[in-house]
Amino acid sequence: MDPLLIAGGGIGGLAAALGLARNGSRVTVLERASALGEIGAGIQLGPNAFRAFDALGVGDAARRMAVYIDRLRLMDAVSGEEIVHIPLDAPFRERFGNPYAVVHRGDLHGVLLQACRDDPAIALRVKSEVVSYEQDANGVTATLSSGERLQGVALVGADGLWSKVRAQVVGDGAPRVSGHTTYRSVIPTERMPEALRWNAATLWAGPKCHVVHYPLSGWKVFNLVVTCHNDAPEPLAGKPVSAEEVHAGFRHTHERVQSIIRHGSDWKAWVLCDREPVLRWTDGRVALLGDAAHPMLQYFAQGACMALEDAVCLANAVAVGRDDIAGALLSYNEQRVLRTTRVQLQSREIGQHIYHPAGAHAALRDSLMRAKDANAWLDTLEWLYGGPQAESPANARVKIARA
Ligand SMILES: Cc1cc2nc3c(=O)[nH]c(=O)nc-3n(C[C@H](O)[C@H](O)[C@H](O)COP(=O)(O)OP(=O)(O)OC[C@H]3O[C@@H](n4cnc5c(N)ncnc54)[C@H](O)[C@@H]3O)c2cc1C
Protein backbone atom coordinates (compact mmCIF):
# COMPACT_ATOMS: atom_id res chain seq x y z
CA MET A 1 0.00 0.00 0.00
CA ASP A 2 1.17 3.59 -0.66
CA PRO A 3 2.36 5.59 2.35
CA LEU A 4 0.49 8.44 3.92
CA LEU A 5 2.18 11.69 2.76
CA ILE A 6 2.84 14.64 5.05
CA ALA A 7 3.85 18.02 3.61
CA GLY A 8 6.04 19.81 6.17
CA GLY A 9 8.55 18.59 8.75
CA GLY A 10 7.94 21.17 11.49
CA ILE A 11 6.63 20.32 14.96
CA GLY A 12 3.18 19.51 13.56
CA GLY A 13 4.35 17.38 10.63
CA LEU A 14 6.80 15.31 12.69
CA ALA A 15 4.28 14.82 15.49
CA ALA A 16 1.69 13.63 12.96
CA ALA A 17 4.23 11.24 11.42
CA LEU A 18 4.96 9.76 14.84
CA GLY A 19 1.32 9.37 15.81
CA LEU A 20 0.32 7.82 12.49
CA ALA A 21 3.28 5.42 12.48
CA ARG A 22 2.56 4.33 16.05
CA ASN A 23 -0.99 3.54 14.99
CA GLY A 24 0.09 1.37 12.07
CA SER A 25 0.51 3.69 9.03
CA ARG A 26 3.53 3.96 6.79
CA VAL A 27 4.42 7.66 6.41
CA THR A 28 6.59 9.83 4.16
CA VAL A 29 7.38 13.36 5.38
CA LEU A 30 8.13 15.86 2.59
CA GLU A 31 10.01 18.92 3.85
CA ARG A 32 10.73 21.91 1.62
CA ALA A 33 13.95 23.02 3.38
CA SER A 34 17.31 21.39 2.74
CA ALA A 35 17.59 20.33 6.40
CA LEU A 36 15.10 19.49 9.13
CA GLY A 37 15.23 21.98 12.00
CA GLU A 38 13.54 24.87 13.85
CA ILE A 39 14.37 28.54 14.10
CA GLY A 40 13.59 30.81 17.04
CA ALA A 41 14.54 30.09 20.60
CA GLY A 42 11.93 29.31 23.22
CA ILE A 43 8.46 27.92 23.30
CA GLN A 44 6.01 27.56 26.18
CA LEU A 45 4.18 24.28 26.60
CA GLY A 46 0.94 23.91 28.53
CA PRO A 47 -0.04 20.65 30.27
CA ASN A 48 -2.02 19.68 27.17
CA ALA A 49 1.24 19.44 25.19
CA PHE A 50 2.65 16.91 27.66
CA ARG A 51 -0.50 14.81 27.33
CA ALA A 52 0.15 14.76 23.57
CA PHE A 53 3.85 13.87 24.02
CA ASP A 54 2.82 10.85 26.08
CA ALA A 55 0.37 9.72 23.39
CA LEU A 56 3.14 10.10 20.79
CA GLY A 57 5.58 8.04 22.88
CA VAL A 58 8.06 10.89 23.55
CA GLY A 59 6.82 12.03 26.99
CA ASP A 60 10.00 11.14 28.90
CA ALA A 61 12.34 12.73 26.36
CA ALA A 62 10.20 15.89 26.26
CA ARG A 63 10.11 16.16 30.06
CA ARG A 64 13.90 15.81 30.29
CA MET A 65 14.66 18.90 28.19
CA ALA A 66 12.11 21.28 29.77
CA VAL A 67 12.62 24.07 32.29
CA TYR A 68 9.81 23.91 34.87
CA ILE A 69 8.83 27.47 35.70
CA ASP A 70 6.84 28.10 38.86
CA ARG A 71 4.48 30.87 37.80
CA LEU A 72 2.92 32.80 34.94
CA ARG A 73 3.46 36.40 35.89
CA LEU A 74 1.65 39.44 34.48
CA MET A 75 3.38 42.78 35.10
CA ASP A 76 2.32 46.34 34.26
CA ALA A 77 4.91 47.64 31.79
CA VAL A 78 4.22 51.27 32.75
CA SER A 79 4.15 51.13 36.57
CA GLY A 80 6.58 48.20 36.78
CA GLU A 81 4.29 46.44 39.31
CA GLU A 82 2.84 42.95 39.30
CA ILE A 83 -0.80 42.72 38.23
CA VAL A 84 -1.33 39.03 38.96
CA HIS A 85 0.43 35.69 38.89
CA ILE A 86 -0.81 32.14 38.40
CA PRO A 87 1.13 29.56 40.45
CA LEU A 88 2.17 26.47 38.50
CA ASP A 89 2.92 24.39 41.59
CA ALA A 90 1.35 21.16 42.88
CA PRO A 91 -2.35 22.22 42.69
CA PHE A 92 -1.86 23.25 39.03
CA ARG A 93 -0.11 19.98 38.15
CA GLU A 94 -2.65 17.90 40.04
CA ARG A 95 -5.56 19.65 38.40
CA PHE A 96 -4.26 19.20 34.85
CA GLY A 97 -2.19 16.05 35.36
CA ASN A 98 0.91 17.65 33.87
CA PRO A 99 3.31 20.57 34.30
CA TYR A 100 3.66 23.88 32.46
CA ALA A 101 7.16 24.23 31.02
CA VAL A 102 9.37 26.11 28.57
CA VAL A 103 11.73 24.46 26.10
CA HIS A 104 14.12 25.35 23.34
CA ARG A 105 12.38 24.86 19.99
CA GLY A 106 15.41 23.13 18.54
CA ASP A 107 15.41 20.66 21.45
CA LEU A 108 11.71 19.94 21.04
CA HIS A 109 12.00 19.48 17.29
CA GLY A 110 15.08 17.29 17.92
CA VAL A 111 13.14 14.95 20.21
CA LEU A 112 10.41 14.50 17.58
CA LEU A 113 12.97 14.10 14.79
CA GLN A 114 14.97 11.45 16.65
CA ALA A 115 11.80 9.47 17.35
CA CYS A 116 10.86 9.69 13.63
CA ARG A 117 14.35 8.54 12.60
CA ASP A 118 14.09 5.59 14.99
CA ASP A 119 10.79 4.45 13.46
CA PRO A 120 11.21 2.29 10.34
CA ALA A 121 7.65 3.15 9.24
CA ILE A 122 8.66 6.83 8.71
CA ALA A 123 10.64 8.12 5.71
CA LEU A 124 11.95 11.70 5.89
CA ARG A 125 12.71 13.66 2.71
CA VAL A 126 14.17 17.17 2.47
CA LYS A 127 14.23 19.52 -0.56
CA SER A 128 10.73 18.25 -1.31
CA GLU A 129 8.30 21.13 -1.62
CA VAL A 130 4.71 20.07 -2.23
CA VAL A 131 3.07 22.47 -4.67
CA SER A 132 -0.22 20.75 -5.50
CA TYR A 133 -2.19 17.53 -5.32
CA GLU A 134 -4.70 15.49 -7.28
CA GLN A 135 -6.87 12.69 -5.96
CA ASP A 136 -9.23 9.96 -7.06
CA ALA A 137 -11.04 7.09 -5.37
CA ASN A 138 -7.78 5.15 -4.91
CA GLY A 139 -5.36 7.71 -3.56
CA VAL A 140 -3.61 11.08 -3.75
CA THR A 141 -0.80 12.28 -6.00
CA ALA A 142 1.37 15.07 -4.57
CA THR A 143 3.39 17.12 -7.03
CA LEU A 144 6.70 18.59 -5.86
CA SER A 145 8.30 21.79 -7.14
CA SER A 146 10.85 19.59 -8.93
CA GLY A 147 8.00 18.08 -10.96
CA GLU A 148 8.28 14.72 -9.19
CA ARG A 149 4.94 13.08 -8.42
CA LEU A 150 4.38 10.90 -5.36
CA GLN A 151 1.49 8.53 -4.68
CA GLY A 152 -0.07 8.34 -1.24
CA VAL A 153 -3.10 6.92 0.46
CA ALA A 154 -3.75 10.42 1.86
CA LEU A 155 -1.99 13.80 2.19
CA VAL A 156 -1.64 15.86 5.38
CA GLY A 157 -0.77 19.52 4.81
CA ALA A 158 1.40 20.45 7.82
CA ASP A 159 3.15 23.11 5.78
CA GLY A 160 2.59 26.08 8.05
CA LEU A 161 1.14 29.58 7.76
CA TRP A 162 1.74 29.90 4.00
CA SER A 163 0.55 26.35 3.25
CA LYS A 164 0.37 25.42 -0.43
CA VAL A 165 -1.90 22.51 0.48
CA ARG A 166 -4.30 24.94 2.17
CA ALA A 167 -4.38 27.07 -0.97
CA GLN A 168 -6.02 24.11 -2.70
CA VAL A 169 -8.13 22.79 0.21
CA VAL A 170 -9.50 26.14 1.42
CA GLY A 171 -8.29 28.71 -1.10
CA ASP A 172 -8.60 31.69 1.21
CA GLY A 173 -5.63 33.68 -0.08
CA ALA A 174 -2.84 35.23 1.96
CA PRO A 175 -2.87 35.26 5.78
CA ARG A 176 -4.22 38.28 7.68
CA VAL A 177 -1.48 40.71 8.72
CA SER A 178 -2.06 41.67 12.36
CA GLY A 179 0.04 44.86 12.34
CA HIS A 180 1.95 43.52 15.37
CA THR A 181 5.74 43.22 15.08
CA THR A 182 7.54 40.72 17.31
CA TYR A 183 11.28 41.00 17.95
CA ARG A 184 13.16 38.03 19.37
CA SER A 185 16.51 37.79 21.14
CA VAL A 186 18.28 35.54 23.63
CA ILE A 187 20.14 36.92 26.68
CA PRO A 188 22.86 34.93 28.47
CA THR A 189 21.55 34.56 32.04
CA GLU A 190 24.51 36.46 33.56
CA ARG A 191 23.51 39.52 31.46
CA MET A 192 19.85 39.47 32.53
CA PRO A 193 19.33 42.06 35.34
CA GLU A 194 19.81 40.02 38.51
CA ALA A 195 16.61 41.25 40.15
CA LEU A 196 14.59 39.99 37.17
CA ARG A 197 15.98 36.47 36.89
CA TRP A 198 12.62 34.96 37.78
CA ASN A 199 11.66 31.34 37.33
CA ALA A 200 8.53 32.43 35.56
CA ALA A 201 7.07 33.10 32.15
CA THR A 202 6.80 36.85 32.67
CA LEU A 203 4.71 39.16 30.56
CA TRP A 204 5.00 42.95 30.86
CA ALA A 205 1.82 44.42 29.37
CA GLY A 206 1.87 48.02 28.15
CA PRO A 207 0.03 50.38 25.78
CA LYS A 208 0.34 48.81 22.30
CA CYS A 209 3.35 46.76 23.38
CA HIS A 210 4.40 43.86 25.57
CA VAL A 211 7.53 41.96 26.61
CA VAL A 212 7.83 38.25 27.44
CA HIS A 213 10.83 36.51 29.02
CA TYR A 214 11.63 33.17 30.62
CA PRO A 215 14.69 31.03 31.39
CA LEU A 216 15.70 28.42 28.85
CA SER A 217 18.17 25.60 28.19
CA GLY A 218 18.87 24.69 31.82
CA TRP A 219 18.95 28.38 32.81
CA LYS A 220 21.87 29.17 30.48
CA VAL A 221 19.87 31.88 28.69
CA PHE A 222 16.69 33.96 28.88
CA ASN A 223 14.34 33.92 25.92
CA LEU A 224 13.19 37.46 25.15
CA VAL A 225 10.24 38.23 22.89
CA VAL A 226 9.02 41.83 22.63
CA THR A 227 6.04 42.91 20.59
CA CYS A 228 4.80 46.25 19.32
CA HIS A 229 1.41 47.00 17.78
CA ASN A 230 2.94 49.36 15.20
CA ASP A 231 0.49 48.73 12.32
CA ALA A 232 3.19 47.03 10.25
CA PRO A 233 1.56 46.55 6.84
CA GLU A 234 3.55 43.62 5.39
CA PRO A 235 4.31 40.09 6.61
CA LEU A 236 7.92 39.57 7.73
CA ALA A 237 9.72 36.51 9.11
CA GLY A 238 13.07 36.53 10.85
CA LYS A 239 14.53 39.77 9.42
CA PRO A 240 17.58 41.04 11.37
CA VAL A 241 16.86 44.52 12.78
CA SER A 242 18.79 47.12 14.83
CA ALA A 243 18.49 47.47 18.60
CA GLU A 244 17.45 51.08 17.93
CA GLU A 245 14.34 49.94 16.03
CA VAL A 246 13.36 47.62 18.87
CA HIS A 247 13.86 50.23 21.62
CA ALA A 248 11.80 52.81 19.72
CA GLY A 249 8.55 50.98 20.52
CA PHE A 250 9.23 50.85 24.27
CA ARG A 251 10.29 54.38 25.26
CA HIS A 252 7.00 54.81 27.14
CA THR A 253 7.61 51.77 29.36
CA HIS A 254 9.09 51.50 32.87
CA GLU A 255 12.87 51.56 33.33
CA ARG A 256 12.77 47.90 34.46
CA VAL A 257 11.31 46.92 31.08
CA GLN A 258 13.77 49.06 29.15
CA SER A 259 16.68 47.60 31.10
CA ILE A 260 15.70 44.11 29.92
CA ILE A 261 15.41 45.20 26.31
CA ARG A 262 18.82 46.92 26.48
CA HIS A 263 20.41 43.54 27.12
CA GLY A 264 19.02 41.98 23.95
CA SER A 265 21.22 41.63 20.86
CA ASP A 266 21.02 40.09 17.36
CA TRP A 267 17.35 41.03 17.17
CA LYS A 268 15.16 39.48 14.50
CA ALA A 269 11.68 40.69 13.55
CA TRP A 270 8.46 38.93 12.59
CA VAL A 271 5.23 40.65 11.58
CA LEU A 272 2.56 38.38 13.00
CA CYS A 273 -0.18 36.89 10.87
CA ASP A 274 -3.15 34.65 11.48
CA ARG A 275 -6.27 33.68 9.55
CA GLU A 276 -10.00 33.72 10.03
CA PRO A 277 -11.06 30.31 11.35
CA VAL A 278 -12.73 28.01 8.81
CA LEU A 279 -15.03 25.10 9.55
CA ARG A 280 -13.64 22.72 6.99
CA TRP A 281 -9.99 21.92 6.44
CA THR A 282 -10.32 18.61 4.64
CA ASP A 283 -10.85 17.76 0.99
CA GLY A 284 -11.48 14.04 0.57
CA ARG A 285 -8.13 12.32 1.20
CA VAL A 286 -6.39 15.59 2.10
CA ALA A 287 -6.39 17.29 5.52
CA LEU A 288 -4.59 20.25 7.09
CA LEU A 289 -2.87 20.27 10.48
CA GLY A 290 -1.22 22.83 12.80
CA ASP A 291 -0.61 26.33 11.44
CA ALA A 292 -1.75 25.24 7.98
CA ALA A 293 -5.20 24.54 9.44
CA HIS A 294 -5.60 27.20 12.15
CA PRO A 295 -2.77 29.76 12.32
CA MET A 296 -3.05 31.96 15.39
CA LEU A 297 -1.28 34.84 17.09
CA GLN A 298 1.09 33.48 19.74
CA TYR A 299 -0.64 35.20 22.67
CA PHE A 300 -2.07 32.01 24.18
CA ALA A 301 1.30 30.26 23.60
CA GLN A 302 -0.69 27.40 22.08
CA GLY A 303 0.10 27.15 18.32
CA ALA A 304 2.52 24.26 18.72
CA CYS A 305 0.42 22.72 21.49
CA MET A 306 -2.59 22.69 19.13
CA ALA A 307 -0.47 21.10 16.38
CA LEU A 308 0.57 18.34 18.82
CA GLU A 309 -3.03 17.73 19.83
CA ASP A 310 -4.04 17.65 16.15
CA ALA A 311 -1.42 14.98 15.54
CA VAL A 312 -2.80 12.72 18.28
CA CYS A 313 -6.39 13.19 17.15
CA LEU A 314 -5.53 12.58 13.49
CA ALA A 315 -3.59 9.42 14.30
CA ASN A 316 -6.48 8.03 16.35
CA ALA A 317 -9.06 8.93 13.69
CA VAL A 318 -7.03 7.21 10.96
CA ALA A 319 -6.49 4.13 13.15
CA VAL A 320 -10.23 3.59 13.56
CA GLY A 321 -11.20 4.70 10.05
CA ARG A 322 -8.52 3.10 7.89
CA ASP A 323 -11.11 1.63 5.50
CA ASP A 324 -12.61 5.06 4.83
CA ILE A 325 -9.71 7.49 4.92
CA ALA A 326 -11.74 10.51 3.78
CA GLY A 327 -14.26 9.80 6.55
CA ALA A 328 -11.44 9.48 9.07
CA LEU A 329 -9.96 12.84 8.07
CA LEU A 330 -13.38 14.48 8.27
CA SER A 331 -13.87 13.00 11.74
CA TYR A 332 -10.53 14.52 12.82
CA ASN A 333 -11.64 17.89 11.41
CA GLU A 334 -14.97 17.61 13.28
CA GLN A 335 -13.28 16.81 16.59
CA ARG A 336 -10.71 19.60 16.40
CA VAL A 337 -12.32 22.61 14.79
CA LEU A 338 -14.28 24.22 17.65
CA ARG A 339 -11.36 23.98 20.06
CA THR A 340 -8.82 25.43 17.64
CA THR A 341 -11.26 28.15 16.55
CA ARG A 342 -11.64 29.22 20.17
CA VAL A 343 -7.86 29.42 20.62
CA GLN A 344 -7.46 31.37 17.37
CA LEU A 345 -10.12 33.92 18.30
CA GLN A 346 -9.18 34.25 21.97
CA SER A 347 -5.53 34.74 21.04
CA ARG A 348 -6.59 37.93 19.27
CA GLU A 349 -8.79 38.94 22.21
CA ILE A 350 -5.98 38.48 24.70
CA GLY A 351 -3.77 40.75 22.62
CA GLN A 352 -6.40 43.46 22.61
CA HIS A 353 -7.74 43.24 26.17
CA ILE A 354 -4.82 41.93 28.25
CA TYR A 355 -1.53 42.54 26.45
CA HIS A 356 -1.95 45.98 24.88
CA PRO A 357 -4.57 48.20 26.57
CA ALA A 358 -3.96 51.65 28.02
CA GLY A 359 -5.74 53.98 30.47
CA ALA A 360 -9.21 52.93 31.65
CA HIS A 361 -9.06 49.78 29.52
CA ALA A 362 -5.85 48.72 31.34
CA ALA A 363 -7.29 49.64 34.74
CA LEU A 364 -10.32 47.45 34.04
CA ARG A 365 -8.02 44.60 33.05
CA ASP A 366 -6.09 44.94 36.31
CA SER A 367 -9.25 45.00 38.40
CA LEU A 368 -10.80 41.97 36.67
CA MET A 369 -7.62 39.94 36.78
CA ARG A 370 -6.81 40.74 40.42
CA ALA A 371 -10.30 39.68 41.48
CA LYS A 372 -9.51 36.04 40.71
CA ASP A 373 -7.69 33.78 43.15
CA ALA A 374 -5.48 30.86 42.08
CA ASN A 375 -8.40 28.40 42.07
CA ALA A 376 -10.51 30.66 39.89
CA TRP A 377 -7.62 30.83 37.40
CA LEU A 378 -7.47 27.06 37.26
CA ASP A 379 -11.22 26.98 36.55
CA THR A 380 -10.75 29.55 33.78
CA LEU A 381 -8.01 27.48 32.15
CA GLU A 382 -9.72 24.10 32.51
CA TRP A 383 -11.12 23.96 28.95
CA LEU A 384 -7.65 24.56 27.52
CA TYR A 385 -5.14 22.82 29.78
CA GLY A 386 -7.56 20.04 30.70
CA GLY A 387 -7.04 18.88 27.12
CA PRO A 388 -9.42 18.20 24.25
CA GLN A 389 -11.58 15.98 26.47
CA ALA A 390 -12.21 18.70 29.09
CA GLU A 391 -15.91 19.47 29.59
CA SER A 392 -16.58 22.52 27.44
CA PRO A 393 -18.87 23.33 24.52
CA ALA A 394 -15.72 24.51 22.71
CA ASN A 395 -14.31 20.98 22.94
CA ALA A 396 -17.42 19.38 21.45
CA ARG A 397 -17.53 17.74 18.06
CA VAL A 398 -19.28 19.60 15.26
CA LYS A 399 -21.04 17.91 12.35
CA ILE A 400 -19.59 18.83 8.93
CA ALA A 401 -21.42 17.64 5.81
CA ARG A 402 -19.42 15.24 3.66
CA ALA A 403 -18.67 16.96 0.35
C1 LIG B 1 6.89 34.60 18.18
C2 LIG B 1 6.15 33.29 18.30
C3 LIG B 1 6.08 32.67 19.54
C4 LIG B 1 5.38 31.47 19.69
N1 LIG B 1 5.30 30.89 20.93
C5 LIG B 1 4.62 29.75 21.08
C6 LIG B 1 4.53 29.12 22.37
O1 LIG B 1 5.08 29.63 23.34
N2 LIG B 1 3.84 27.95 22.47
C7 LIG B 1 3.23 27.35 21.39
O2 LIG B 1 2.62 26.29 21.53
N3 LIG B 1 3.29 27.94 20.15
C8 LIG B 1 3.97 29.10 19.98
N4 LIG B 1 4.05 29.67 18.74
C9 LIG B 1 3.38 29.03 17.60
C10 LIG B 1 4.17 27.87 17.02
O3 LIG B 1 5.49 28.28 16.73
C11 LIG B 1 3.51 27.36 15.76
O4 LIG B 1 2.13 27.25 15.94
C12 LIG B 1 4.05 25.98 15.38
O5 LIG B 1 5.43 26.04 15.18
C13 LIG B 1 3.35 25.47 14.11
O6 LIG B 1 3.94 24.26 13.71
P1 LIG B 1 3.60 23.67 12.27
O7 LIG B 1 4.40 22.42 12.18
O8 LIG B 1 2.14 23.62 12.06
O9 LIG B 1 4.13 24.76 11.22
P2 LIG B 1 5.61 25.26 10.95
O10 LIG B 1 6.42 25.30 12.19
O11 LIG B 1 5.48 26.53 10.16
O12 LIG B 1 6.24 24.13 10.01
C14 LIG B 1 5.91 24.03 8.65
C15 LIG B 1 7.01 23.22 7.96
O13 LIG B 1 6.61 22.97 6.62
C16 LIG B 1 7.66 23.33 5.72
N5 LIG B 1 6.99 23.70 4.48
C17 LIG B 1 6.39 24.87 4.17
N6 LIG B 1 5.81 24.81 2.96
C18 LIG B 1 6.04 23.55 2.49
C19 LIG B 1 5.66 22.87 1.30
N7 LIG B 1 4.90 23.47 0.37
N8 LIG B 1 6.06 21.59 1.13
C20 LIG B 1 6.82 20.96 2.08
N9 LIG B 1 7.21 21.58 3.22
C21 LIG B 1 6.80 22.85 3.44
C22 LIG B 1 8.41 24.43 6.42
O14 LIG B 1 9.74 24.54 5.94
C23 LIG B 1 8.34 23.96 7.88
O15 LIG B 1 9.37 23.07 8.20
C24 LIG B 1 4.74 30.87 18.56
C25 LIG B 1 4.83 31.50 17.32
C26 LIG B 1 5.51 32.69 17.17
C27 LIG B 1 5.58 33.35 15.82
Image: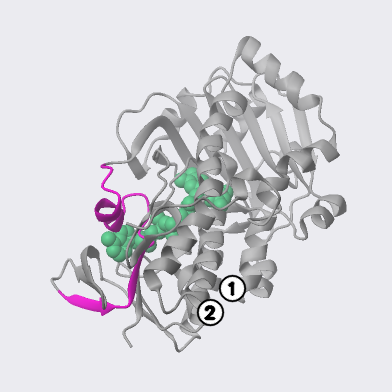
* Element carrying mark 2: helix
Q: Is residue 8 left or right of residue 50?
A: left
> As shown in the figure, which amino acid type bears the numbered disc 1?
Leu
How busy is the neighbourhood of tag 2: few (under 14 within 10 Å), some, or many (20 plus)? some
| Residue 167 x, y percent position in the rendering | 26, 51
Number of marks: 2
Q: Compared to 350, does 46 lie above or below? A: below
CA distance separating discs 2 and 1 = 9 Å
Q: Compared to 247, does 396 lie above or below? A: below
Viewer-side residue, 31 vs 341: 341
Q: Quadrant of residue 52?
A: bottom right
Residue located beneath label 1 in the image: 56
| Residue 58 x, y percent position in the rendering | 62, 74
Q: Is residue 226 visible?
A: yes
Viewer-side residue, 99 vs 323: 323
Q: Quadrant of the N terminus?
A: bottom left
As drawn, the label of residue 115 is 2
If you read the primary sequence from the N terminus, does the residue marked by circle 2 or circle 1 appear first?
1
| Residue 106 x, y percent position in the rendering | 51, 63
Q: Which residues are magenta?
A: 148-173
Colour scheme used in the picture?
A: one colour
- At 55% from the left and 72% from the top, the residue drawn is 111
**Residue at the far left in the pictured view:** 147
